[in-house]
Amino acid sequence: MSWVKYHVDYLRNWRKAAEAVARAAREIRHDAKVYVIGGAAEGRLTVESDVDLVVCIPSASREELSSLMKEIMRRAIDLHGLPWDYPIELHMCDERMCEEILKKYKYLDIN
């Protein structure tokens, strides 16, 4: 099997990866909401894609969002089976930023 086919097949498991991140986020903050945007949400993943996840945390400061991102990824990998090399990009947002992003992009709700 070629690397390209392997990688595209790997990317097709984006829902399982997104659910691992969503579980981890809700364990840390029960009010967290997770959405998929970009190629996965639009059904256009390519070999160069990553999976963009918007993690919305109401009333969070920039510093808190940064530390939460690290903890969410750690839990998703260590406790929920997210492969350490899965191409995910987390976009950590407070409620206002989240609303702006979701107005601009097609999204899928993973909550």
Image (cartoon, grey):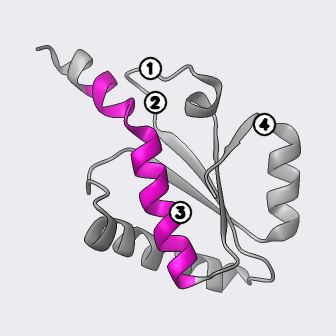
Gap between marks 1 and 4 measured at Cα: 18 Å
Say which of marks 3 and 2 sits in front: 3
Q: Is residue 109 above or below residue 72?
A: above
Task: Please identify the residue farthest to the front as the structure is shown.
Answer: 111
Task: Tell which tag, 4 or 3, sits nearer the viewer.
Answer: 3
Q: Which residue is mark 3?
A: 22
Q: Residues within 10 Å of mark 2 (few under 14, many from 20)?
A: some
Q: Which residue type does callout 4 highlight? A: Tyr
- In percent of width and height, residue 70 lies at 45, 75
Q: In the displayed structure, does residue 12 sit left or right of residue 103?
A: left
Residue 1 in picture, x, y percent from top left:
11, 14
Residue identified by numbered label 1 = 46
CA gap, disc 1 and disc 2: 5 Å
Please tell me which residue is depicted at 32% across the width and 57% down the height of the picture.
82
Is the residue under label 3 in contact with that under label 4 (CB below 8 Å)? Answer: no
Magenta span of residues: 7-28
3D distance between C-alphas at marks 1 and 3: 23 Å
Residue type for callout 1: Thr
The mark nearer the N terminus, 1 or 4, is: 1
Q: Residue at x 37, y 75 (%)?
A: 75
Does residue 63 appear to the left or right of 68 in the view shown?
right
- What crowding class fits label 1: few (fewer than 14 Cα within 10 Å), some (14-19), or many (20 or more)? some
Residue that carries the numbered disc 2 in the rendered image? 49
Say whether disc 4 or disc 2 marks the residue closer to the N-terminus.
Answer: 2
- Callout 4 secondary element: loop
Prevailing SS of the magenta stretch: helix
Residue picked out by circle 4: 105
Q: Toward which corner of the image does residue 76 lie, by quadrant?
A: bottom left
How far apart are the alpha carbons under marks 3 and 2? 20 Å
Q: Secondary structure at mark 1?
A: loop
Label 1 with label 2: CB-CB less than 8 Å: yes
